[in-house]
Image: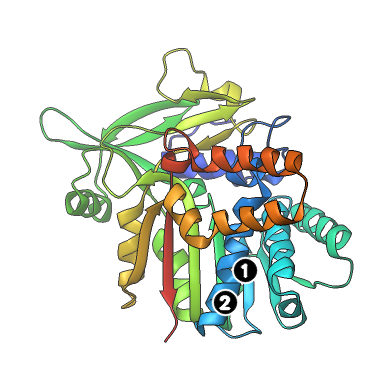
Amino acid sequence: MNTKKQKFSDYFNAWLYSKDGYYSKYKEIGKEGDFYTSVSTSSFFGGSIGKRVVDSIKEGNLPKDTTIVEVGAHHGYLLADIIQFIYTLNPKLLDTLNFAIVERFENLQEKQTKYLQECFADAVKIKHYNDISEVKLPHAFIIANEIFDAFACELVYTTNDNIFQMAYVKDHKIKFEDCNDKKLIEHCKKYKITKGEVGIGYEDFIENICTNIKKFEFITFDYGDRVPRNDFSTRIYTKHEVFPIFEEAVDLKEYFTKADITYDVYFNHIVDCFKTYKIEDITFKTQMLALVDFGIIDLLEILKANSDENTYLRESQKIKTLLEPTGMGDRFKMLHVKKTS
């Protein structure tokens, strides 16, 4: 029962990660679930990342015994697609590569282990970490698909009188009050944010990666952009419907822990977190450009040469959904970070 006033970030965390939070239980994704993702759209999404892994090793950026780490793997579909395409492109790599998942919920760890065992039997071993801080490796290829929009955030707002406010929640009602958090105020001044979300925890997450892994490639896809939206994007997803949290008819209590809650990611914040550790090899692109650069069209040509026409046309349509500029191709963005020396 939400009867005490709390910061929005605490309310957000309770919504998703408490004992009965939305992410504490397995959720279907796709046609039968609450929402679609690029992973549920086409296996070639993971296939493109798998090709990037193969190319990175071929280029000498990472060794053959590197560890592929997925952060928040849900059922394990994405990692399975990556592994399958690596096997297609260079089967011998499965003899040397290591695979790991960062997942805080034990019940989801069990589902991921079971699914990947069903897919690959004993050919692939999966190590689980409960938190990114536990991942300490000489080299890794890290995938974090739609992760940053699941970090808690504060909601901020600047009044007409230029008074900086932040959101608090009581009884599932959001109210803005004057903010005394100097760090939050400085962050918003730095990035010229007058209204919207400020992600909480990005710095600690990236610090763990940069200090605990000597060499890595890091890839993340998410909703968002490199410029502040200066409007509220926080929204609820349920049964393929979207409800902005400030929509008058939305009762937060009705959806609390029962639906997904998310917001647009401000990528410059993430970029600067990596730059704090003197990492400059950072690429920002739309999903469309990223997947094309990773070789999704090359993979489609391989399929064309090794399958019937119906299979090829069916997969082509799915890939089109991933790449469409008016849909996923432009709405999702990618950040590719390399620390290889």
Q: Which residue is mark 2?
A: 140
Asked whether the residues under the numbered discs 1 and 2 touch, taking CB atoms below 8 Å apart as contact, a structural biologist would say yes
Query: Dot 1: within a 10 Å radius of its alpha carbon, few (fewer than 14), some, or many (20 or more) residues?
Result: many
Residue 27's quadrant in the figure?
Answer: top right
Query: Where is 66 relative to 168, above or below?
Result: below
Give the colour scheme of this rendering: rainbow
The percent coordinates of residue 32 (x first, y second) are 73, 30
Q: Is residue 167 visible?
A: yes
In this orientation, which residue lies closer to the viewer: 201 or 340? 340
Residue 36's quadrant in the figure?
Answer: top right
Q: Is residue 129 visible?
A: no
Q: Report the amino acid beneath label 2.
A: Ala
Mark 1 residue element: strand
The percent coordinates of residue 257 (x first, y second) are 62, 34
Distance (Cα) linking label 1 and label 2: 7 Å
In this view, which residue lies farthest toward the top?
249
- Assign the C terminus to one quadrant of the image: bottom left
In this orientation, which residue lies closer to the viewer: 50 or 101? 50
User: Which residue is painted at 86% across and 62% down in the image?
Assistant: 117
Query: Dot 2: within a 10 Å radius of its alpha carbon, few (fewer than 14), some, or many (20 or more) residues?
Result: many
Classify residue 85 as left or right of residue 155. Answer: right
In this view, which residue lies farthest toward the left?
161
Query: Where is 138 relative to 85, above or below?
Result: below
Classify residue 28 as left or right of residue 298. Answer: right
Q: Which residue is mark 1?
A: 69
In this orientation, which residue lies closer to the viewer: 200 or 296? 296
Query: Where is 269 relative to 15, above or below?
Result: below
